Each structure stands twice: as C-alpha cells, then as structure tokens.
Image (spheres, rainbow, N blue to C red):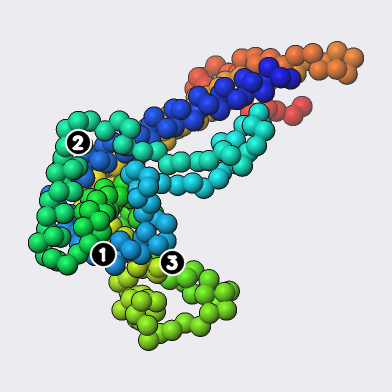
Amino acid sequence: MHESVVEDYMVIKAQEKAWEEASESDMLEVLEEALICTKCQITVTEAIMKLDVDNGAYIDAHYPPFFANTRTRDDNISPLHADSSKTKYEDPSWWRKISFSQRERYYAMVEENLNRSLNENKDIDPEVAVLFAHYQVDYHIRQHYLARRGVLSLCRNASDLQDLRTWQWDMAAIDRINMGKDIDVSDPDEGWLPEERQWGWPGDRNLEKAHQVPMWKRNSPVRRKRLRAVRAKWAIIMEERRKQREELLKKTGTTVTVRLYLSGDLMTVRELPRVVEVESGMRLGKKMKSSTF
C-alpha cells in the first residue's frame, strides 16, 4: 500500500514538473513577443497601477509581479503531505529562465518609461516613478500573455465576442442583485450606462479587456489558420471513420457470428464465412430466394 502511494506521488510530481516546464516555455515565448512588439498602443496611468496594487493583482514583492499567486489549491496536494495548508500554488514565472539579452531589453524599456515619467511630471515621487516604469512593461507583457490564455481567446469571431460581453454583463447584474446592491446607472465607473454595456466590460477598471480586444482583432489571421488546421484534422478523422464503417459492413456482410454452447454454457464465439448458394444463370453474388415446399 505504501509503495503504491509513493508511486502515485512520483507520478504527480513528474506531471507537475512537465506542466511547469511547458508553462515556463510558453511564458518565455510571450516575453520575447512583448519585448519586440511595436504594434501595441497601450496607455496606462498611475491610478490604474494603484488600483492593481490595492487589489493584490500587482505584487511588487514578487517578480514578475503580475503573475504572483498564493492561492491554495488541493489538486496538486499529495496525501503524503502532513500539513496541506503549507502547499501553495504559484503561477509559473519567466524570470528564472530569462536570457541575458531579454533582461537587457526589459530594463531598457523600464529606463525609457522612467525617463518619460520624470520628464512629464517633475513632482512625482522617485519610488513611485520607478514602480510605475516597471508596471508599464509588466502590464504590456501580461496583455500578450492574456492574448493566448485569456477568455477572449475562446471567441472565434465578433459575434462570439459580443455574446461573451453580453453574458458577462448579465452575470454582473445577477451578482449585484444577489449581493443586495442597487444598480447605479448614473455612475460610469460601474459600467451600467448603455454605451458601457455595448463597448465596455464589467469590472474592467484596469482596462485589461479593453486593451485585449485590439490584440484579439490582430490575431484573427492566426485564429483562422488554426481553425483551418483543426477542420483539416477533423476531415481526416471523419474519413478514417468512414473507412472503418465500410470495413465493418463488409465484414458483417460476408461472415456470420456463431456461438458454441456446451451444456448451456457459452464456450466460444466464432466468425464463419457466409455461404451463398446460387443457381445456374443467376448473377454471381445475388442471394437465392428461399422457397416453401
């Protein structure tokens, strides 16, 4: 029993390691994509940064801050752990395997943002300026990450996107009703105005989804290419299934299943060739009709 538990634990750890390596590899691709990106026109403010810091979405004590996560999950906990509450789940980080050239580009972008902030606002606190410079780069990287992993990546077209937006607004309204809150249609921050429902997203005060939509639109050629590839694979699968059905029909048409019993007990099941009697002058392969004498 103990050996079986140990084996299960080793399998779980191996799966966790494989998942972590795949996730880190994906995040390094995202990092490279963001560091060389020249298409995104993302503008964030100190107010948005403060909002993410206050909400715990941006934890500057962890690096990279946006991907810090200290939630406790039970799907990775082994029964061998005596105290499961100490098992913490952390999102993968690209910082452990970042290359030297990527690190240089990252800090070059931070320095560029810092100089711009100091030039635009002479009264800004230097510590806030440094944090904001990092935040702008990290925010951009996160947008590229969400472009692959976010809920918008599930939308195939504009109709799916609008359906998702409508559904999220409906769910937000239900949540507020369940919490006993009234809908304040005069407060644009709440996002209950008609134009907000049409173009905005509920709870998107840090404008994440607002910035994801342009990236989603830019990725439409990639989605179409992926859809064509999936359809081609599905066509191959369906053709294989058709051939299998034909072979099954041929087999059932030329053989007969015979079950052999001995003293009421089934001994074996055999497939025997079907014998078709033909009369002279009849076309070969056509069954002769049975006659009653």
Question: Height in image: 248 above or below 234?
Answer: above
SS of the residue at dot 1? helix
Tell me if I can see residue 26 in this picture: no
Question: Height in image: 164 above or below 218?
Answer: below
10 Å crowding of disc 1: few (<14), some (14-19), many (20+):
some
Which residue is found at the position 90% from the left and 14% from the top? 263
Question: Height in image: 280 above or below 156?
Answer: above
The percent coordinates of residue 107 (x first, y second) are 18, 43
Residue type at numbered disc 3: Gln
SS of the residue at dot 3? helix
Residue type at numbered disc 2: Gln
Q: Which mark is residue 86?
A: none
Relative horizontal placement of residue 240, taking residue 274 as reference (left or right): left
Which residue is found at the position 57% from the left and 79% from the top? 180
The percent coordinates of residue 240 (x first, y second) are 42, 29
User: Which mark is nearer the camera, 1 or 2?
Assistant: 1
Q: Which residue is mark 2?
A: 102
10 Å crowding of disc 3: few (<14), some (14-19), many (20+):
some
Find residue 127 and report its image quarter: bottom left
- Mark-to-mark CA distance, 1 and 2: 25 Å
- Placement of the C terminus among the 4 image quadrants: top right
User: Which mark is nearer the camera, 2 or 3?
Assistant: 2
Q: Which residue is mark 3?
A: 168
Relative horizontal placement of residue 173, taking residue 258 as reference (left or right): left
User: Which mark is nearer the camera, 3 or 1?
Assistant: 1
Specify the farthest residue to the left: 119
Q: Which mark is residue 46?
A: 1
SS of the residue at dot 2? helix
